[in-house]
Amino acid sequence: MQSSMSKKNKVIVIIPSYNGQSYWPDLLPTLVQENYPDFDLEIVVVDNNSSDNSADYIEGKYPQITVIRNKKNTGYVGANNIGYEYAKNKKADFIYLLNQDTEVTHGFLQPLYNFAITHKFGSLQSKLLLHADKKINTLGNVIHYLGFGYGKDSGKSDSQQQINKINYASGAGVFINMSALEKLGYLFDETMFMYLEDLDLGWSLNLLGYDNYLIPDSVIYHKYEFERGMKHLHWFERNRLWVMLKNYKLLSLILISPAWILMEFGQIFFAIINKRLMQKLKAYIWLFSIKQWHILLKKRRLIQSIRQRSDRQVVRKFSGQILFQPLNNPLLSIANIVFGLYWQIIRLFIFW
């Protein structure tokens, strides 16, 4: 708790942006009106060399927002990492990562801050609702033991929820403890560029002994488009394999390998029928290059050396099924049975 004489905590909202000018009229007018007596708030937009004059628009219309201009597109990961370095230099206590395709609700930071100053945590998830129909986008994301991530209760009607622990928070709207990041040494793994970097962060924070939570009284509306993400399948696939190879202990990797191999054949089949085979092959080519293996082993040694929790403690809440409405089809239902059963069995043997 802060005394009346102590310095206020500082929260910095970081918005990574690329050609986001069409989103600003819905997001920024409400966001810049946010004011909190308990803490100091700063808004930072990190522009990834946009071609739609986004940065000029913000500087002209919202001078209270700090704009950082990148000379090249550093991806979602790179932009957030630049914002994180800015927040470190500003001695921020917490950061809030916010997608450009969102709308905030008044007071959305207060429930997060109230929880943050009274609990140990890694990250806090705002409740994300779909902008179009106000149904649930995610109530915190779930990690499948084969590296997939998906939004909990996605597509369901909204209702009352309680604060609870989650596998990881979606990067579209997440409040993060800077002291936890200091121990980790970074925000996002810069190798990943975009997609599943939030999964990797949540997994890493959990390994370090920090839990992630849903704070449902903080509400964000998200203009989420599943198909937009599927156009970048190779990023999903290379990063999915990357986080498993980096974060699991070796014995865990060996134990899941039969299901992993079977899933790879399934993913290749999926890529073929959806005319995305080249994207899948591109992921393999990148991952199995000598250069990337050198980087991977270095990053793996780091996270394994600083981890405070066992695999048994961390993966017990991983899922063996993918329960994600946009992917609902008969083949997935069969896969959920097979891979779910295998997970129910093998996780009993993970005692390390």
Image (tube, rainbow, N blue to C red):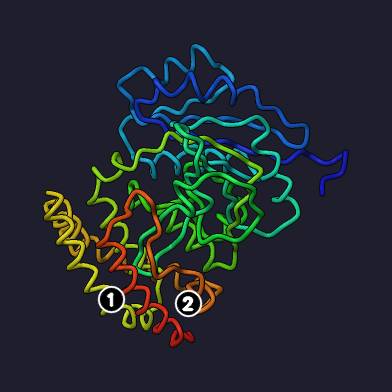
Judge the density around disc 2: few (<14), some (14-19), many (≥20) Cα neighbours within 10 Å: many
Q: Which residue is pictured at 49% across the width and 12% down the height? A: 60
User: x, y (%) of residue 160?
Assistant: 64, 48
Residue 326 % position (x, y): 34, 48
Quadrant of residue 35 in the image? top right
Q: Is residue 272 visible?
A: yes
Q: Position of residue 237 (x, y in %)?
A: 26, 57
Q: Residue at x 21, y 67 (%)?
A: 264
Query: Is disc 1 surrounded by few (<14), some (14 to 19) or many (20+) residues within 10 Å?
Result: some
Disc 1 marks which amino acid? Answer: Ala
Which element carries disc 2, helix, strand or loop?
helix
> Does the CB distance between marks 1 and 2 fall below 8 Å?
no
Residue hosting label 2: 311
The residue at which mark 1 appears reads as: 259
Disc 1 to disc 2, C-alpha distance: 18 Å
Q: Position of residue 201 (x, y in %)?
A: 47, 57
The foreground one among 51 and 140 is 140
Determine which quarter of the picture holds residue 57.
top left
Quadrant housing residue 127: top right
Residue 275 horizontal side relative to residue 169, left or right: left
Do we see residue 85 in this rendering? no
- Placement of 174 over or under 305, stated as above or below: above
Q: Is residue 293 left or right of residue 94?
A: left
In-front residue for pair 335/11: 335
> What's under tag 2, amino acid-wise?
Asp
Tell which circle, 1 or 2, labels the residue nearer the N-terminal end: 1
Q: Is residue 150 found left or right of 162 in the rendered image? A: left
